[in-house]
Image (tube, grey):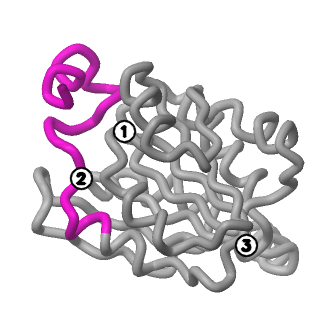
Amino acid sequence: MFLRKFIQNPKQIGSIIPSSRFLARKMIQAVSWREVHAIAELGSGTGAITRFIQPQIDNASKVFLFELDDIMRRNLKESYPQFICHSNACNMNSIMNQHGIDQLDCIISGLPFFTFENEVRETLLHQITNALKPGGYLVAFQYSLQMKKHLLDHFVIEKIDLVPFNIPPAFVYVCRKRDDGEMDNRRSRSIV
């Protein structure tokens, strides 16, 4: 099914097979789970990373899953009925508000940002930045380093890890949302 979906819409799916367990573990290891009470996964797909998120959270945590593909989203709803499942991450902030959540501690993303049109990419980055609390984390994998500059405009990139045991090999970006003081310092440095 995944390969067929990729062939039908490569810009939306991004890969010919689901993420490997090596990639999923690397993504999960980047999160301080004791501090996570609200989290979103963008581009949940077949649940390759979702299944690693599930044992890390407690029953009180809110988990939002976003997946555009109808069939994959239906499967996610059946497999993870305790999670909140929606289609479009471009509406993440309003969906969070509907469920009484102001900010997220962490966002995990498998979205192929660089394949998106500029407007969609910027909308998503805006949604992510607004959704995260100051100091909150975005852990995102990409198949190249082309998103580094775009992510630096919004976050502090704490590290980038290569996961060679994935098809194709992937880079895991661990990005922290700047707090207000860091934003002011960044603005003053850019003015000088």
Q: Which residue is mark 1?
A: 45
Q: Is residue 5 magenta?
A: yes
Q: Which residue is mark 3?
A: 178
Depth check: give the residue in front, 122 or 168: 168
Q: Position of residue 61 (x, y in %)?
A: 70, 65
**Marks 2 and 1, the one that precedes in the sequence:** 2
Instruction: For residue 192, say whether it is visible.
Output: no
Q: Earlier in the sequence, mark 2 or mark 3?
A: 2
Q: In the rendering, which numbered label is found on residue 19?
A: 2
Q: Earlier in the sequence, mark 1 or mark 3?
A: 1
The image shows residue 14, relative to residue 168, as above or below, that is above
Question: Where's residue 175, x and y in %?
Answer: 54, 70
Whole-angstrom CA distance, mark 1 to mark 3, is 29 Å
Instruction: Give SS at disc 2.
Output: loop
Whether 56 is drawn above or below 132: the answer is below
**Disc 2 marks which amino acid?**
Ser
Q: Residue at x 31, y 52 (%)?
A: 48
Task: Answer with left or right where residue 141 lies relative to residue 137.
Answer: left
Q: Residues within 10 Å of mark 1 (few under 14, many from 20)?
A: many
Q: Is residue 131 visible?
A: yes
Number of the front mark, 1 or 3:
1
Q: Is residue 87 positioned above or below 108 on the image? A: above
Q: 10 Å neighbourhood of mark 2: few (<14), some, or many (≥20)?
A: many
What's the distance in space between the residues labelled 2 and 1, CA to CA?
9 Å
Q: Is residue 116 magenta?
A: no
Q: Which residues are magenta?
A: 1-24
Whether tag 2 and tag 1 are in contact, CB under 8 A, the answer is: yes
Q: Could you say which is closer to the camera, residue 71 or residue 5?
A: 71
Which SS class for mark 3? loop
